[in-house]
Amino acid sequence: MSTTVQLGYLISACLFILGLKRLSKPRTAVQGNMMGSAGMLVAVVVTLLGFDLVNLPVIAAGIAVGAAVGVLLATRVAMTGMPQLVALFNGFGGLASLLVGAATLHLELGNDTLVSTDLATGGLTVAIGAITFTGSVVAFTKLQEIFNGSAASAAVLRAGNVVLVAGAVVLMVLLVLSPSSMWLWLLALVALAAGVTLVWPIGGADMPVVIALLNSMSGLAASTTGFVLGNSLLIIAGALVGASGLILTFIMCRAMNRTLGNVLFGSIDASGVTADADSVYEGKITSSSADEVALLLDTAEKVAIIPGYGMAVAQAQHAVRDLTRVLEDRGSEVVFAIHPVAGRMPGHMNVLLAEAEIPYDQLKEMDHVNPTFSQVDLAIVLGANDVVNPEARENPDSPIAGMPIIDVDKARTVVVIKRSLSPGFAGIPNPLFALDNTLMLFGDGRTAVEEISSAMAEL
């Protein structure tokens, strides 16, 4: 590798590290994204110019097609579709690692200089890349609501996880001990199947964890591909993505008070719940209207809005922005309380609200906003459920016991905008809906918020 290539890779690595640092804060995230993109551009140019590549026209055509698809996706996919797009991006990263690792190892299998570490690294690249690819495709189909497995099929698939993962490990050992294309391609097939069985049983509320984990795995696959190719930049970049994704995965798990193993191989158990929906809600639900909520907002000095996946489904973020401006014009202070696992991917609510031009300083993390709810005059829960369920704090037998929640029930008045009293992912009733200080505004999230804004304009 020439000095020029090494210098280019060093510059790229520095840009990746600085870009990742910038991505940690909303105000500098755009700069971080640009720095990361610049680092990748430098890496691609240096690689194309510094190595004796066989067919530059074919590579150029691939770059052109990829750029066209990227531009199309960036301009056409709605912000509510970002979780699906991120899942596909993770899948493409895994597929690239799978193809490069398998092709390289296949060509080198007859080489006497191939050592056990090369075979082990190549096997890991194929296995991780394959699991990431099919797992990400399944995550996309679930997020897009194309397919959803039944509880029975989920139980069968969970049982098959252990068999497939164990089979992949055995095939990797056989590949190292007795190098053969047969073991290589069998490993790829088993790992592809394992990606399906690992992700298919996982429910929608666990998707932020899955997306973060698949992102980490795509980085890890890229890093092992770097070892296969002897490319230092791939090793560094993949390690950065893998480590940051894994850290985010554990942050998500902690926010749900669950282990990664429970997310992947278990499920939320509602058997400990003693109260059913009828006993929690019957005769205790107070319905409201947009006009009544508008009257309450007219005198509220501090308003907290708690968004959930229902806001994304209703595409209500722009209506929320308009309501926020109406409230601020009347002198109210408006903050947004963001739970780490609200939505279908890490930072989902932040992304949607940023797209609606909600200022970053109004988005408050759960730990920051919870101590202030006693001063909140009115809290609006928009499409959130389990992340505001007091059961997590008060009932040690609840399946969500110990899960950190947003303490919205401590506000003076709570308005819950929801289509119905249907439970969240945990499958348990939410006593918040039946509290004396809670009003239920049933209906589509966007329509309800627009009606509140219209009613306030008439006051």
Image (spheres, rainbow, N blue to C red):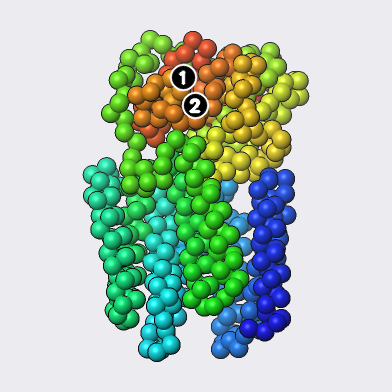
Decide: few, some or many residues near mark 2? Use Cα within 10 Å; few <14, some 14-19, many ≥20: many
Q: Does residue 450 appear in the picture of this structure?
A: no
| Mark 1 lies on residue | 432
Residue type at the position of mark 1? Leu
Quadrant, the C terminus: top right
Residue in front for this viewpoint, 281 or 30: 30
| Quarter where residue 69 is shown | bottom right
Q: Earlier in the sequence, mark 2 or mark 1?
A: 2
Q: Secondary structure at mark 2?
A: helix
| Mark 2 lies on residue | 388
Q: Does residue 253 appear in the picture of this structure?
A: yes
| Quarter where residue 448 is shown | top right
Location of residue 273 in the rendering, given as x and y in whole percent from the top left corner: 31, 24
Location of residue 413 in the rendering, given as x and y in whole percent from the top left corner: 57, 14
Residue in front for this viewpoint, 60 or 174: 174
Question: Which residue corresponds to the image point at 32% horizontal and 65% vertical from the top-left?
Answer: 169
Location of residue 295 in the rendering, given as x and y in whole percent from the top left corner: 63, 13
Question: Which residue corresponds to the image point at 31% horizontal and 71% vertical from the top-left?
Answer: 173
Residue 329 horizontal side relative to residue 318, left or right: right
In 3D space, how far apart are the residues under numbered discs 2 and 1 (Cα atoms)? 8 Å
Residue type at the position of mark 2? Val
Quadrant, the N terminus: bottom right
Question: Which residue corresponds to the image point at 65% horizontal and 44% vertical from the top-left?
Answer: 355
Q: Secondary structure at mark 1?
A: helix
Determine whether label 2 and label 1 are within 8 Å by CB: yes
Location of residue 243 in the rendering, given as x and y in whole percent from the top left corner: 54, 56
Residue in front for this viewpoint, 222 or 458: 222
Question: Which residue corresponds to the image point at 52% horizontal and 78% vertical from the top-left?
Answer: 229
Decide: few, some or many residues near mark 1? Use Cα within 10 Å; few <14, some 14-19, many ≥20: many
The image shows residue 40, relative to residue 152, as above or below, that is: below
